[in-house]
Image (cartoon, grey):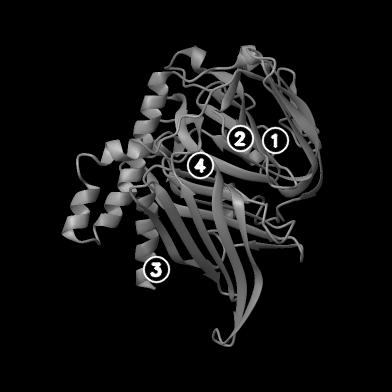
Amino acid sequence: MVSSNIKLLYHPEYYHGNGIEEKFFEGWYFKTVSKDNNEAFIVIPGIYRAPSITNDNESHAFVMVLLSGFDCLYYRYEVNEFEASSSSDMEFYVKIGDNKFQKSGITLNLPSSRLIKPTDKEYEEYSDLLVNDWANIINFKSSDQSNAESQLFTSPTLKQDLLKNVVRHKFISYSVQGQVSFDKMVLFPATYTYPSVMGPFAFIPSLECNHGILSMNHRSQGNIEFTNEENKDDFKKIIFENGCGYIEKDWGTDFPQSYIWGQTNNFMNEDGSSIFFSVADIPLISSDSLFSKIPFLKNSLPLRFPGRLIIFYHGSTNTTYNFSTYTLSFVRELNVEMDNSATQHINIYISNIQGYHLKISIKRRAGRGIPLRAPVKQFEKMLLRVEESLDAEMSVKLWHTQRNHEIENVIFHDRSVNVGLEVVGDVMWIAEKYQKVIQSN
């Protein structure tokens, strides 16, 4: 992977797994939303290569389909049914079976015979992971509460109370066909020093997980059909006329163990704007890296820090604002809270030395999202680990101040109710690290 990261430094959209036979994943995230915001459709093509010490049957290609109110549709393919362009000399494409993904659009032909249905045991393990993550948030909060309230949070019934909030969506054996075309893409403004959204971190070829943005916003046209092969009367068709879309990707050896990710480009009052953010526990050098063999580093691994990628694109002025770790910006607030009803609140406030300020406020009911498979390091396989909500609510405010904050010019202030949100792992470790930095300033 190191060689492909160097080779494709300025072209993160391409496939990075050429020649890699084990311990690798790569996935592309295509999101399309109807103009009226009533339908959100997500498709994720990708590949997973298991470590050689595990059963080779774990290696496979896949296409995930997400639709609000339904269980994730996970179509499994053999590794040899996966093709993708791995050189910038080629036109970008990913092909899995009869499904093709390009910058110009997607073509889907997903038969229900390829579906993998989650087992009851998988759901039970997934639910346990969720409530453990939630308990970490609640118990962290309880350290500032009264003894009586703290006892309530840590009571023996907490787990059972939280489990009641985990919704198991209905699984339907849908075959999915259709085409959606894209145009008017808004690209991340890469530069020589910022070759991708990773900024200068893109020059570190051995990161555990890498991220790329293919399109912050674009127009979508087409339709997708869902046919229930067990009940032909159950037919659903989504038509996208002047819809909007977003494309990103991840690749590496493992997902971050803890992170918060959010994205929307469907604001209520202003079309064309888009925001993406991720704050994560990032191992700068993981125990799986070649650099871990260096003697003086071995005893200090993993070297980890709380990193962030925060990009806001303002459509009406065609301006991209970057508040990521590698920019001259600093976090003023990062709070994560949750109550026993599984309502989560996330607040992020960040500023830069140019006087720009960004405030993000998010609310969701955890447990109602869609379970997704992701590479899980301790088990070395793709497991149900990630809950993605498609209906989180977000408020975004961007403003600029002058003369010691005496003059405030609001550039953007809007809401979205179709926000994609993932909150995974011990996110309070991330929040606590940022809180210590805030208090020291």
Q: Residue at x 67, y 58 (%)?
A: 268
Disc 2/disc 1 C-alpha distance (Å):
13 Å
Q: Which mark is residue 14?
A: 1
Quadrant in the rendering for residue 249: top right
Kindly identify the amino acid type of the residue bearing the numbered disc 2. Ser
Closer to us: 318 or 270: 270
Q: Residue 207 carries which label?
A: 4
Comparing 344 with 312, the one in front is 344
**Residue bearing the label numbered 2:** 3
Q: Quadrant of the N terminus?
A: top right
Other-residue count near label 4 (Cα within 10 Å), few / some / many at <14 / 14–19 / ≥20:
many
The three-letter code of the residue at mark 3 reads Ile
The quadrant of the picture occupied by the C terminus is: bottom left
Q: Distance between the residues labelled 3 and 4?
A: 26 Å
From this viewpoint, is residue 199 visible? yes
Q: Earlier in the sequence, mark 3 or mark 2?
A: 2
Disc on the earlier residue, 2 or 1: 2
Q: Distance between the residues labelled 4 and 1?
A: 17 Å
In percent of the image, x 59 and y 67: which residue is there?
Answer: 397
